Amino acid sequence: MLHLNIGNKKLSNYFQDIDMAIWQLEPDIDRINQERKDSMVEALGIEVIEVGQDFIKGTMPVDRRTLQPEGKLHGGASAALAENLGSIGSTLCIDI
């Protein structure tokens, strides 16, 4: 399983006693994952597993869906994971 954090974990540790969430929209992990059904995100097994005040954590299995024929993790799968989490974070930061 590949884990990727988007955000600044050091910053969140520094400000742990201060309520400084960067999100303009309230993050709902179940809704975030549900909205990605029937898409490439679901096909690759990407899931959001945690949202903190200034980070998003997601997972993606390293299996037949995400491997190159040689058995190495495909760079495109890694990019899809990073892009998905980055897009979610960007959306949550926008005051619509």
Image: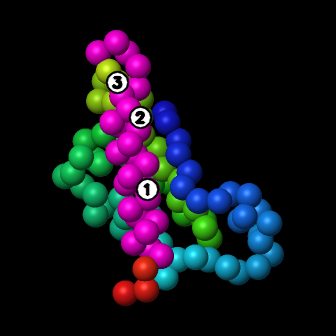
Give the magenta range: 69-93
Whole-percent x and y of residue 50?
Answer: 54, 58
User: Where does residue 83 sit, x and y in percent of width and height?
Assistant: 38, 52
- In this rendering, is residue 56 above or below 82? below
Mark 2 to mark 1: distance in Å?
15 Å
Q: How far apart are marks 2 and 3 (CA)?
A: 10 Å
Prevailing SS of the magenta stretch: helix
Residue at (49% x, 33% y) in the render: 1
Q: Which residue is found at the position 70% from the left and 81% from the top?
A: 19
Residue 28 vs residue 11: left or right?
A: left
> Label 1: which residue?
85
Residue at 43% over, 48% down = 82
Q: Mark 1 belongs to which amino acid?
A: Leu
Relative vertical location of residue 28 with respect to residue 45 in this rendering, above or below: below
Question: Which residue was labeled with disc 2?
Answer: 61
Is mark 2 in CB contact (under 8 Å) with mark 3? no
Q: Is mark 2 on a helix, strand or loop?
A: loop
**Residue 37 in the image: above or below residue 73:** below
* Farthest top residue in view: 70
**Circle 1 SS class:** helix
> In the rendering, at what x and y percent does residue 77 appear?
35, 37
Spatial CA distance of label 3 from label 1 is 20 Å
- Is residue 76 found left or right of 5 in the rendered image? left
Which residue is located at x 68 percent, y 57 percent? 9
Give 49 or 67, whichever is nearer the viewer: 67
26 over 4 or under it: above or below: below
Marks 2 and 3: which is nearer the front?
A: 3
